Amino acid sequence: MARCLVQLADRSPSLTGKQQFAAFASTARRKSPVPPPGLPLRGEFIFTNNEETCPRAQIVPPLLLREACSRFKVMDRSELHSNMDKGGGNVKYVLTGEGAGTLFLIDEKSGDIHATKRLDREEKAMYTLVAKVLDRNTNAELEPDTEFNIKIHDINDNEPKFAKDIYFASVPEMSEVGTSVVTITANDADDQTYGNSAKLVYSILQGQPYFSVDSENGTIKTALPGMDREVKEHYQVVIQAKDMAGQMGGLSGTTTVSITLSDVNDSPPRFANHSFRMTAVESTEVGGAIGRIKADDPDVGRNAEMEYSIVGGHDMFNIITDQTTQEGIIIIKKALDYESKRDYEFRVEVKNTYLDARFISGLQFIDHATVKITVEDVDESPVFTRNPYVIEVHEDTAAGSFVGVVSARDPDADNKPVKYSIDRHTDLERLFNIDSVNGTITTLKALDREMSKWHNISVVATEINNPRQTTRVPVFIKVLDVNDNAPEFAMSYDTFVCENVKAGQLIQTISAVDTDEPLVGHKFVFSMSSTNPNFTIDDRQDNTANILTRRGGFSRREMSVYFLPVVISDNDYPIQSSTSTLVVRVCACDSRGNMQTCNSEVLPFSDGLTTGALVAILLCVIILLMIVVLFAALRRQRKKEPLIISKEDVRDNVVSYNDEGGGEEDTQAFDIGTLRNPEVMDANKLRRDIIPEMLFPFRRTSPIKDNADVRDFINGRLQENDTDPTAPPYDSLATYAYEGGGSLAESLSSLESGATEGDQDYDYLGNWGPQFKKLAEMYIGKSPDRET
């Protein structure tokens, strides 16, 4: 490192003379000495040293070029001229660095630098270049590299720009003057540090006198007091940003700000109409809505939420708030009755659920309205006096006995008549009947409590003038107990007595049951119908009794089985008693009384027949009876007569052919067209293949079509069977012996005949056909004219 004296030769007109300064310069050729701070950056520096010669170099300060200029000379030869260039053409200048060869070109002979196109500071503000001096022949560096900067001088060629074309902002209504709304800023691409090209000033072009803008920072503020959202909600404000500090000639940019006044609760709810009229149908269910009322609140959102209530409450009505529509819904608390009360009137109150303390003073955020409701009448179904009915009736009541009465009425004002009926699906056994006029329930059959203690039926009340108005009520019929059943043994007893038993020994304990249910409980009395020499009974007074032996020494030879009749009585009214037989077998027992065998010994009876012989005889008799019954049944089946006994059967006009058809291909026996359309069948048309037995077929006279009484009779029976719940679920045939009026034969009863048969002419019977052939022969044959 060498210390050198540097002589500055300033080429600028502002510097004169010589300046000396101390500087540290690198002895390396490629290192340029660095001037100390405070000295001019433009000039030629000559380094001298007493001890050794310092390298000579040129320091080129930054060059300022004006942007937006095209093709101009950046630096001439004098600024980069090398001491090694003697003008002989042996020196070559080379330029490297940013933009070298594209934006900047150097004349390799003279060292002049030129710009090839327009420079834009906003694209790049400074370029760093390096100039080299080379030997043209050897390309060897003759001097150290000269590095210099080209700085683009800014001009005001960019207008201010906002980030958005339109901004959105909001401010609460009724805000004070000077309330900040929003701050918007613009950007200017010009140099912020040079001149006023990027110094912006903001102003408002549209939106006065409602808003103002801060000229320095672009903050928009309210400028008018009492701005009401309900009067005007949206505002369009145009803001301008201008550079050059707003001076003439500056560039400008604009943007639009859409400002919305947000709502505050500054408006109370109000009814547009302070009187509402509604109608309600009396059949409306409890909880059902009958109408809506609405108050107006110009506020929005939470500030417009309202709550409705009935002043002082009401017994029949209530009001709730629909949170979606902010309407008051009037609903029914209790069932309405047109016949009881037809008009209602009450007051409704509405208020905001959220209040703003800033606006409460001086305003009443509450309003009232009167609601009048008129009840409309509807045709209501009959109403029973009770629901349900519970009726008690004693069992064994005779058919047709009174059970109870149900009563229903038409709740409407005209009180139309009502008829009663029993739903037969609830009374399949048809145990009860009801008077359709007065609702009296009677029995159709005797009731038995032991079969069913309760009968649950449904009674239907129907308006006579409007059968669609019906009401059902359950009727629970309790069958009360009557002491109509005698007590009997509780079980079947297997009783035996030992042959070696002693007198007074217990052989069986018996008990009884009774299907009746007396109020005070059962109390049975046990006794014998007559004095028994073999056994006695001891009533224990607890509904049980002991069977004791009256004597000892029983023998199977004398009697193997004893039948002991026991009389059991109850204590209810009327007293019921029954005689049950206790079978006592005589068995052989050991010394401790344990049964060993009860088989009776084969001993001859007094008449010479044993028990086995009697059983065998009985079985033979039963077998013979079964054979006789079977034989009789077989003979009866063989002798079963056909439906048509003879060819002259008068029950129907049946033509017998006694042959088998030839199938579908047989077109001679039957007319297929006639089978497909029986209505066009010719009654006189005979078979063509054989001669029928009846040579003169009878042409049946068409019956009278308008048999109204027969048709009504059949329709009535058909409807009765269709509505019968006990009818079978399959198709069935029901026959009725009803002739009807209008018969061609008129009445055949002898009660309407004349005094004598001779007064009548029976010749017309011969025209009635074969059905009445026998009858015609009987009467025509007896005619006096015929006899003569």
Image (cartoon, grey):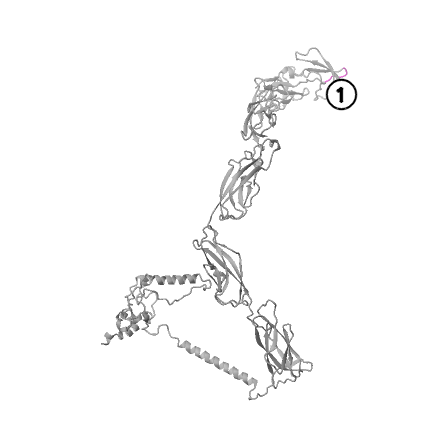
Q: Which residue is mark 1?
A: 1
Q: Which of the 4 image quadrants contains residue 143?
A: top right
Query: Which residue is more in the foreground, 127 or 746?
Result: 746
Magenta-tinted stretch:
50-54
Query: Which residue is more in the foreground, 447 or 6?
Result: 447
Q: Position of residue 135 (x, y in %)?
A: 65, 20
Residue found at the very far right of the displayed protein: 51
Q: Position of residue 410 (x, y in %)?
A: 47, 53
What kind of residue is marked 1?
Met
Q: Dot 1, how many residues are within 10 Å of its Cα: few (below 14), some (14-19), or many (20+)?
A: few
Q: Position of residue 356 (x, y in %)?
A: 61, 33
Q: Position of residue 687 (x, y in %)?
A: 29, 68
Please name the residue shown 57% across and 88% down the image.
606
Dominant SS of magenta comes to loop
Query: Which residue is more in the foreground, 509 or 537?
Result: 537
Please name the residue shown 37% across and 72% down the image.
643
